[in-house]
Amino acid sequence: MLYRTMKKAGEKLSILGFGCMRLPQTPDCHIDEEKATEMVHYAISRGVNYFDTAYVYHNGESEGILGRALSDGYREKVNIATKMPVWAVEKPEDMDRFLDEQLERLQTDHIDFYLLHGLMKKTWNQVIDLDVTGFLDRAIEDGRIRYAGFSFHDNLCLFEEIVNSYNWTFCQVQYNYMDEEYQAGTEGLRYAHERGLGIMVMEPLRGGTLTNQSGVLKKIWAETGTSRAPAEWGLRWVWDHPEVTVVLSGMSKLSQVKDNASYANHGTPSTLTGEELLVYEKIKRVYREKMKIPCTKCGYCLPCPGGIAIPDCFSIYNDAFIYDDAGNAKLVYEVFTGFGGAASCCQDCGVCESLCPQHIPIRKCLKEVVRLFGK
């Protein structure tokens, strides 16, 4: 495992962070605690020391599972990062209530890295009006949190405003070889780094969509003459940026933990060759030509009032184009929606669009899904 030091914190952090948003699940959609614990312990044994969760992940189960997995001495080996659900903060005392509940769930007396979750213009203005920076100062002073940061889902202008508004230690942004100009993008990455902030990267593989090995993509990967899997190519691209401190991976299988921990032994910055960088350009052209809906399956749009499984509908729809196989995609869609969740159930309420960090016109896209697959 390789490590990078966060400038303001002075902390030596593993370049691979364990994201606890996509933990393995049982058939009834609860976290499979036995498998999740095994994954956490394996990651720690391979040197991972940064674990990222949030109040809302897995419908509130993630923090408790992580807290139990880190009992029996594991807590002292790692840094915990979790997030305040800023959209649910209505009054100043809510901030203390959420933090104290999170400390209890995680079975710890302090959070190492505490973030304001998914800041956008509306939520930023909401918590600023409630003196969230004063709250962060008090929580640091009384020892409940060590370092303050924020995760972000809006435009570069707002990102710079937020960076300049407080003495943040770190920030968390979406970044991968398909998203160099998306939201904060490369310019935001450099802006925050120049001001001394540590940078945690989420969605390095765009919810797994950058691990595709079919059709033209398979040919491009094969032509590289290396044994690297697409996932390693994706992670290596982010690690190649010296501004990045930690790359978060939302792993759902032990095999993914093993693979990613292995890749993290080679994530040295500024080492990709010109020839390797050309491979990314080829892949980007293919994805840009094929992908129709830029959904990362983060799940923020759920639950849908109409019961639609929005990310899954979009994923299957995209597969029809990425894999050049609309027929098979339609069969998968029909099987999947046989138990409910079809795009045709849209009530046109727009709730999902107000929550989507990617700002996808979800209602319009659902109509495209129906047009391709039928009702």
Image (cartoon, rainbow, N blue to C red):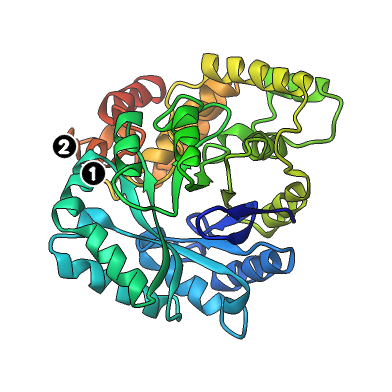
- Residue farthest to the bottom, as pictured: 72
Residue 92: % across, % down: 16, 65
* In this view, 3 is above or below 362: below
Name the kind of residue labelled 2 in the image: Cys
- Give the residue displayed 71% in from the left and 63% down from the top: 47
What kind of element bears circle 1? Answer: loop
The residue at which mark 1 appears reads as: 306
| Foreground residue among 42 and 151 | 151
Residue 136: % across, % down: 30, 64
Is mark 1 in CB contact (under 8 Å) with mark 2?
yes
Q: CA distance from mark 1 to mark 2?
A: 9 Å
What kind of element bears circle 2? Answer: loop
Q: Quadrant of the N terminus?
A: bottom right
Residue 51: % across, % down: 54, 62
- Give the residue displayed 51% in from the left and 31% down from the top: 331
Name the kind of residue labelled 1 in the image: Gly
The residue at which mark 2 appears reads as: 349
Q: Quadrant of residue 176?
A: top right
Please tell me how many numbered marks the rendered image carries.
Answer: 2
Q: Quadrant of residue 102?
A: bottom left
Within 10 Å of disc 1 (Cα), the crowding (few <14, some 14-19, many 20+) is some
- Taking the image as shown, residue 23 lies to the left or right of residue 305, namely right
- Give the residue displayed 51% in from the left and 46% down from the top: 199
Is residue 87 shown to the viewer in this render? yes
* In this view, 280 is above or below 249: above
* In this view, 345 is above or below 330: below
- Taking the image as shown, residue 352 lies to the left or right of residue 171, namely left
Residue 73: % across, % down: 62, 83
Q: Quadrant of the C terminus?
A: top left
- Give the residue displayed 47% in from the left and 47% down from the top: 197
Between marks 1 and 2 in the image, the one whose residue lies nearer the viewer: 2
